[in-house]
Amino acid sequence: MRVAIYDRVEPPVPSELPLQLVETCSHRAAAAKLVFAVPVVLAVGFATLSLVLYALLAPPARALVAEHPALGLEILAAIAFWTYLLGLPLKRLFDRLAVKRTIEIDATTVTVTEGGHFRSWTWQAPLSSFAGVAHHVRASLSGTRHELILVHPTREKSVLLSLAHQMSQSEVDRVAALLKHTEVPPTELYRLKARLPRLTLPAWRDPAHA
């Protein structure tokens, strides 16, 4: 689950091990966005449906599609694209109404339980497998927020530890020391772990055999 989706972390700042954090989203903000987005999606959907019905029922449009079958495929592709483009934001807003994440950290293990509308799942990782603690500042249309993130080499496993409008260096140092990790630059959050296959040259082309 993306770190940015959460806007509440309880307790606000980790204090001692073992610790448990509960992360949720603001239902009020998600509901307000849904109230705004649903009429827009319905209006665009109605216009699209009207276009499809015209293409299926109007004799001139049916004759044009019959003469140029590729045009029909283009219309279907455009409908699928708009359905995806409009449906994805609605799905994400709907998910925000029920999404919840519980994080438990002890001296050796990080356990994360994620839940949504219909299912929940749990995964674990050794605390030593994380790269460090990053102080990340995220800017959006809603403003600026400071995030303290336990960074994992696999981006999806990075864990949000704290969230605030301001965050001092002493707070960052204290949490890093609590987890026995060092502070890492926030750019580590965007570093992809490349796993490229290793190529082996035939012996007759390998310089070592020249």
Image (spheres, rainbow, N blue to C red):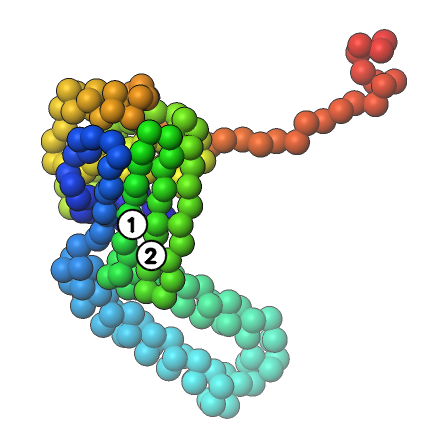
Q: What is the crowding at mark 2: few (fewer than 14 residues within 10 Å), some, or many (at least 20)?
A: some
Q: Is residue 16 above or below residue 184?
A: below
The residue that disc 2 covers is 115
Horizontally, is 88 left or right of 176 in the view? right
Q: Is residue 22 above or below residue 72?
A: above
Q: Earlier in the sequence, mark 1 or mark 2?
A: 1
Residue 76 x %, y %: 51, 72
Residue nearer the viewer, 9 or 111: 111
Residue 46: which disc? Answer: none
Q: Which amino acid type corresponds to the residue marked 2 in the rendered image?
A: Gly
Provide the secondary structure element on which disc 2 rests: strand
Q: What is the crowding at mark 1: few (fewer than 14 residues within 10 Å), some, or many (at least 20)?
A: many
Residue at 36% across, 42% down: 111
Q: Are marks 1 and 2 in contact (CB under 8 Å)?
A: yes
Horizontally, is 86 left or right of 146 in the view? right
Q: Is residue 52 above or below residue 155?
A: below
Residue 167 x %, y %: 14, 28
The residue that disc 1 covers is 101
Residue at 53% across, 85% down: 62
Residue 110 x %, y %: 36, 37
Q: Which amino acid type corresponds to the residue marked 1 in the rendered image?
A: Arg
Residue nearer the viewer, 35 or 4: 4
Residue at 19% across, 44% down: 9
Q: Spatial distance from mark 1 to mark 2, Cα to Cα?
A: 6 Å
Residue 140 x %, y %: 21, 42
Residue 147 seen anywhere in this rendered image of the structure: no
